[in-house]
Image (tube, helix red, strand yellow):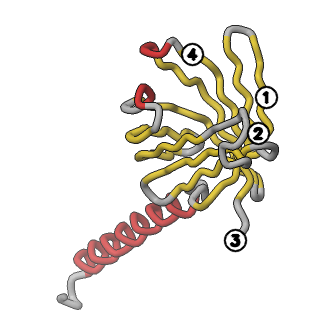
Amino acid sequence: MNQRNPLMKMVARAAVVTLLLSCTGRQSEDVQRMPIEGTWQLLSGTLIEKGDTTVTDYTQDRRMIKIINATHFSFLNHDLKQGKDSVKLFSAGGGRYTLEGDRYTEFLEYCNDRGWEGHEFAFTVSLKNDTLIQSGTEKLENLGIERVNIEKYVRARE
């Protein structure tokens, strides 16, 4: 660069500052992303449908975990008696997700109940310490389902 041209020096410095600021901006967006990646154990689920509220304690008789990585989620749910009583239960599913601020959207690509596949579910999520709460409306016209779903998870321990 020509040392005699102060205008060129200013332009070069401005370009460097602009580059640094744009990189810093991208980094701060990544840092601000809610840290939801990991394995989560469902503690309770609340369904509100047609004025009726059903609360399920997932620490009794059943266990459900949700696994979230950088691009996908999956869930596994089963009874704790290994299907040897009237509560025979197993469900699983997963797919892609997006997270923008507190808006978490699941795109259910795989599910043992095939009527749920191919649907999108938008939730609001909040995270406090090791507790994740997601709430939103599940609407599946083909199955006649329209309900509010509120789930409370705790980060699973190794």
Amino acid type of disc 1?
Val
Q: Residue at x 74, y 29 (%)?
A: 46
Are the residues tagged 2 and 1 within 8 Å (C-beta)?
yes
Image position, residue 115 (x, y; %): 42, 25
Are the residues tagged 3 and 4 within 8 Å (C-beta)?
no
Are the residues tagged 1 and 4 within 8 Å (C-beta)?
no
Amino acid type of disc 3?
Glu
Nearer-N-terminus badge (1/4): 1
Q: Is 101 on the left or on the right of 114, as rendered?
A: right
Q: Is 110 on the left or on the right of 152, as rendered?
A: left
Amino acid type of disc 2?
Ser
Quadrant in the picture for the C terminus: bottom right
Q: Residue at x 49, y 59 (%)?
A: 69
Query: Distance of mark 2 from mark 1, alpha carbons?
Result: 7 Å
Q: Circle 2 — which element?
A: strand
The residue carrying mark 4 is 146
**Of all residues shown, which one is farthest toward the top?**
50
Q: Residues within 10 Å of mark 4 (few under 14, many from 20)?
A: some
Q: Circle 4 — which element?
A: strand
Residue 75 drawn above or below residue 37: above
Query: Distance of mark 3 from mark 4, alpha carbons?
Result: 36 Å
Disc number placed over residue 44 in the picture, else none: 2
Residue 8 drawn above or below residue 127: below
Query: Distance of mark 3 from mark 2, alpha carbons?
Result: 20 Å
- The residue mark sitting in front, 1 or 4, is 1
Residue 72 drawn above or below residue 5: above
Query: Distance of mark 1 from mark 4, alpha carbons?
Result: 16 Å
Q: Residues within 10 Å of mark 1 (few under 14, many from 20)?
A: few
The residue carrying mark 3 is 158
Amino acid type of disc 4?
Glu
Please name whichever residue, 142 or 120, is drawn nearer the observer in this view of the structure.
142
